[in-house]
Image: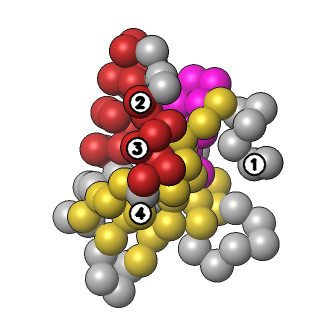
Amino acid sequence: MYRVLLERAAEKDLSRLTSQIHDRVIAAIRALATNPRPPGCRKLAGSKNDWRIRVGDYRVVYEIADEIRVVRINRVRHRRDVYR
């Protein structure tokens, strides 16, 4: 099992979501504790350990630290805003 940590920016992003989308994103984030690299995840180019998963039109950007078994959620934003 991995420990999942939310950055302050990700918490703020989650608070802005509608309840339906919020529940779907939280379920996807919880699933990262058992499998930090689920099917459909992508490694972000230009970074050492940044990954992303899709949840509808939203993207969850996170880092994986395998040596200490931690997943750190950095951002949760709409696909048009997440990479800016």
The residue depicted at 48 percent of the width and 23 percent of the height is: 17
Q: Is residue 20 above or below residue 55?
A: above
Measure the alpha-carbon separation of dots 1 and 4: 17 Å
Residue with the mark numbered 2:
15
Residue 57 spot, x, y in % from top left: 63, 25
Residue with the mark numbered 4:
72
The residue depicted at 45 percent of the width and 70 percent of the height is: 64
Secondary structure at numbered mark 2: helix
Q: Is residue 57 visible?
A: yes
Measure the alpha-carbon separation of dots 3 and 4: 12 Å
Foreground tag (3 vs 4): 3
Q: Is residue 36 visible?
A: no
Residue 51 spot, x, y in % from top left: 58, 59
Measure the alpha-carbon separation of dots 2 and 4: 17 Å
Q: Which residues are magenta?
A: 52-59
Amino acid on which disc 4 is placed: Arg
Q: Is residue 46 above or below residue 38?
A: below
Residue with the mark numbered 3:
11
* Mark 3 vs 4, N-terminal side: 3
* Mark 2 vs 4, N-terminal side: 2
Residue with the mark numbered 1:
83
Secondary structure at numbered mark 1: loop
Amino acid on which disc 2 is placed: Ser
